Image: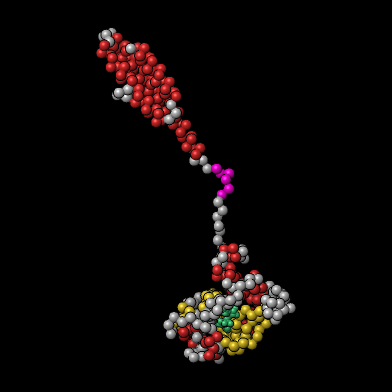
Amino acid sequence: MKEQLDLLQQKALSEIEDTHSVKELQQLNVTYLGRKGSLTNVLRGMGQLSKEERPVIGQLANQVRAAIEKAMEVKQATLEQIELEKQLEKETIDITLPGRPVNIGGAHILTSIIEEIEDIFIGLGYEVREGPEVETDYFNFEALNLPKGHPARDMQDTFYITNELLMRTHTSPVQARTMQALEGNRPVRMICPGKVYRRDNDDATHSHQFTQIEGLYVDKNVRMSDLKGTLNTFAKKIFGEEREIRLRPSFFPFTEPSVEMDISCKVCSGQGCSVCKKTGWIEILGAGMVHPKVLTMAGYDPDVYTGFAFGMGPDRIAMLKYGIDDIRHFYKNDIRFLKQFHNA
Ligand code: FA5
């Protein structure tokens, strides 16, 4: 029986040594030490032993059990360590791999140009105001000296929502709103950027939805020369010192006299080319002295206060500044186009 136990120990230790996984080791534990395992099997023959032999073999069996258990413990620790190392190796992050590129967004070109224009006018002492895009017929037209049925309403083909509500066709209603809010007794110096809507057919220079920036300066003794000086300063700041401006007589029902402002063509420096249609000049805004009727309707006394107003199209200004040949690029959201101006 002693040989049997020695043999069992040798076999068990060698098999333990050869195992490659914790699972195999657990199986060996059952095979050798389990209730129906090899060691239990050998000990079943103890009954046939003499009284003297029994404690000797019993002690030996305990030593064999302890040796097998110890070997299993050591092997288990080794196998667990190996498995841990394998897992760590599998989960290692290769910090030398290049990272995935992150797409960084940027302001839309129209947002950038509007902010640039805002900065210029803030520098001249103007405040920035906002007005609603869904506007009343009263503020969009009537308060601007365009009563119902006035032929000049046709100059701006309108999207009506109801008879009294419409999508504003220009930012000029904010003039009337601002003056009314100030109750006719305080000077005004404000600009108002925002979206406007017209039933224009889309082409290279027209969009049915575009942006405008309104400007309004009302105080005592505001003159046409102040308007010219302001627009000249603005044009040189936005387009460069070498650019010239030209004011042409025009008509708007809410200003008298009215003008349109042209800027000397950047492409041909005023010589005449296809961009400026051979004239050397390109129109960017409408302006004029606020009509006395508009001042009166807003509560300002035209014998005390005078003022000028202007309305420009940032879309057209951005096109001129950056040489963009089609206004529709601004609204297509093609990232390849927009990306070019992220640092503009
Ligand atoms: C007006 O809208 C007047 N409210 C401007 C004004 C304000 C005059 C205050 C006097 C005093 P006009 O329709 O010309 O005017 O438009 C002004 C500017 O908006 C134009 O010079 C042009 O730059 C731009 N614009 C007009 N229509 C379109 C369009 N369909 N697409 C893109 N830009 C346009």
* Viewer-proximal residue among 275 and 120: 275
Query: Which quarter shows the N terminus?
Result: top left
The structure residue drawn at horizontal position 49% and vertical position 91%, both measured from the top left corner, is 149
The structure residue drawn at horizontal position 25% and vertical position 13%, both measured from the top left corner, is 47
Q: Could you tell me how many numbered marks the image carries?
A: 0
Extent of the magenta region: 94-99
Q: Is residue 182 visible?
A: no
Q: Quadrant of residue 217?
A: bottom right
The structure residue drawn at horizontal position 64% and vertical position 70%, both measured from the top left corner, is 322
* Viewer-proximal residue among 298 and 187: 298
Quarter of the render that holds ligand 1: bottom right
Q: Residue furthest right?
A: 271
Q: Is residue 38 visible?
A: yes
In the image: residue 295, left or right of residue 23: right
Q: Where residue 303 sits: x, y (%)?
A: 55, 91
- Our reading of the magenta stretch's main secondary structure is loop
In the image: residue 50, left or right of residue 199: left
Q: Where residue 252 sits: x, y (%)?
A: 57, 87
**In the rendered structure, does residue 43 fall within the stretch colored magenta?**
no
* Viewer-proximal residue among 133 and 42: 42
Q: How is the image coloured?
A: secondary structure
Q: Quadrant of residue 277?
A: bottom right
The structure residue drawn at horizontal position 33% and vertical position 17%, both measured from the top left corner, is 62
Q: Where residue 275 sits: x, y (%)?
A: 67, 76
The answer to whether residue 52 is above or below residue 111 is above
Q: Quadrant of residue 222?
A: bottom right
The answer to whether residue 62 is above or below residue 83 is above
Query: Which quarter shows the C terminus?
Result: bottom right
The answer to whether residue 48 is above or below residue 100 is above
Q: Where residue 76 sits: x, y (%)?
A: 42, 28
